């Protein structure tokens, strides 16, 4: 199953990007364009790491939403799908050796970070931008598709927001390196947390820091750091464009 995930990610996400760049020649978001962006990259990486409590807050809020009675069938299907996805993730996160850890970091963190950003921010977002002619609309439409694709609707809102954050980072910096790093940190943190703490002994309150009762102030600080980080990336991009 893990090998199938790798093959699927490489074929489904990276191939369309390569075809799009080859046919259209649109490289507005350079794959690994880093010149003059290392400071921007560091700030964005720290901002995504600091944003975890706010993302957890949104995830807890999203998970508690219940659809109206008339849509009860859809609500049950969504929760059933979420439970199956969570079961698969827990199966993948079972690690007995350093080799398992390294393989999971490649499978769950590195490959999705690279492949999904190639596809969504490197292919879909430029197509949306060429279509709607407004980068804000292109970013949020792409973020919606990014979250919808994962088919985990109890976490739709935080994933939607993360998609938008990655979209703005790519557009302002002109590089896919920023969203790839953010994606890597978001996914890799979960793998490392399970490895160092243990899947069975991992305290739910630690895993959902910022989303637990009475921790709204942690989520607020987290949101503030993320906002300041994004503002810094935007200002750095303005200076870069003037240079």
Image (tube, grey):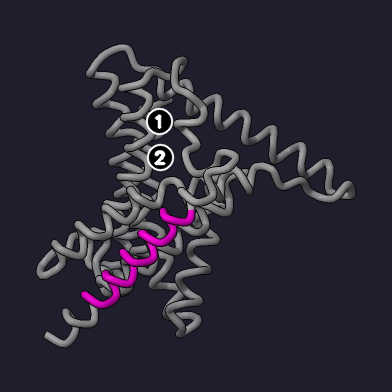
Check whether the beta carbons of the residues at disc 2 and disc 1 lie within 8 A of each other. Answer: yes
Residue occupying image coordinates x 41% and y 23%:
93
Q: Nearer the viewer, residue 212 or 97?
A: 212
Q: Residue furthest bottom?
A: 242
Q: Residue at x 41, y 68 (%)?
A: 125
Find residue 89 and name its label.
none
By secondary structure, the bulk of the magenta-drawn segment is best described as helix
Q: Nearer the viewer, residue 118 or 220?
A: 220
* Residue located at (73% from left, 38% from top): 77
Q: Residue 8: give its label.
A: 2
Residue pushed farthest top?
96
Asked if one can make out residue 71 in the rendered structure from this viewpoint, the answer is yes
Query: Is residue 183 shown above or below 223?
Result: above
Q: Is residue 129 left or right of residue 107?
A: right
70 to the left or right of 225 = right
Q: Is residue 75 above or below residue 221?
A: above
Mark 2 → mark 1, Cα distance in angstroms? 6 Å
Query: Nearest the camera: 196 or 129?
Result: 196
Q: Quadrant of the N terminus?
A: top left
- Is 49 or 69 nearer to us in this picture? 49
Magenta residue check for 197: no
Magenta residues (range): 220-236
Residue sticking out furthest to the right:
70
Rendered residue at 50%/36% (across/down): 208
Pinpoint residue 205: horizontal percent, then vertical percent. Answer: 50, 30
Task: Provide the residue designation for mark 1.
Answer: 4
* Residue 140, horizontal then vertical, whole percent: 50, 69
Q: Quadrant of the C terminus?
A: bottom left
């Amino acid at each position: 199953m893990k090998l199938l995930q790798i093959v699927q990610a490489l074929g489904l996400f990276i191939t369309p990007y390569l075809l799009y760049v080859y046919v259209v020649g649109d490289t507005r978001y350079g794959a690994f364009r880093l010149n003059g962006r290392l400071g921007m990259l560091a700030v964005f990486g720290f901002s995504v790491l600091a944003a975890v409590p706010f993302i957890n807050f949104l995830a807890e809020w999203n998970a508690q939403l219940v659809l109206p009675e008339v849509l009860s069938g859809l609500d049950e299907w969504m929760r059933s799908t979420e439970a199956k996805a969570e079961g698969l993730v827990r199966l993948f996160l079972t690690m007995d050796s350093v080799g398992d850890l390294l393989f999971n970091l490649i499978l769950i963190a590195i490959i999705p970070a690279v492949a999904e950003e190639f596809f969504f921010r490197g292919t879909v977002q430029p197509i949306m931008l060429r279509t709607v002619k407004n980068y804000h609309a292109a970013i949020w439409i792409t973020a919606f598709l990014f979250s919808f694709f994962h088919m985990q609707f109890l976490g739709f809102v935080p994933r939607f927001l993360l998609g938008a954050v990655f979209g703005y980072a790519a557009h302002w910096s002109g590089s896919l390196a920023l969203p790839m790093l953010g994606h890597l940190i978001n996914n890799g943190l979960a793998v490392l947390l399970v490895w160092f703490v243990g899947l069975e002994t991992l305290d739910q309150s630690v895993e959902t820091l910022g989303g637990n009762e009475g921790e709204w102030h942690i989520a607020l600080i987290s949101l503030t750091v993320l906002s300041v980080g994004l503002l810094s990336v935007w200002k750095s991009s303005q200076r870069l464009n003037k240079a």
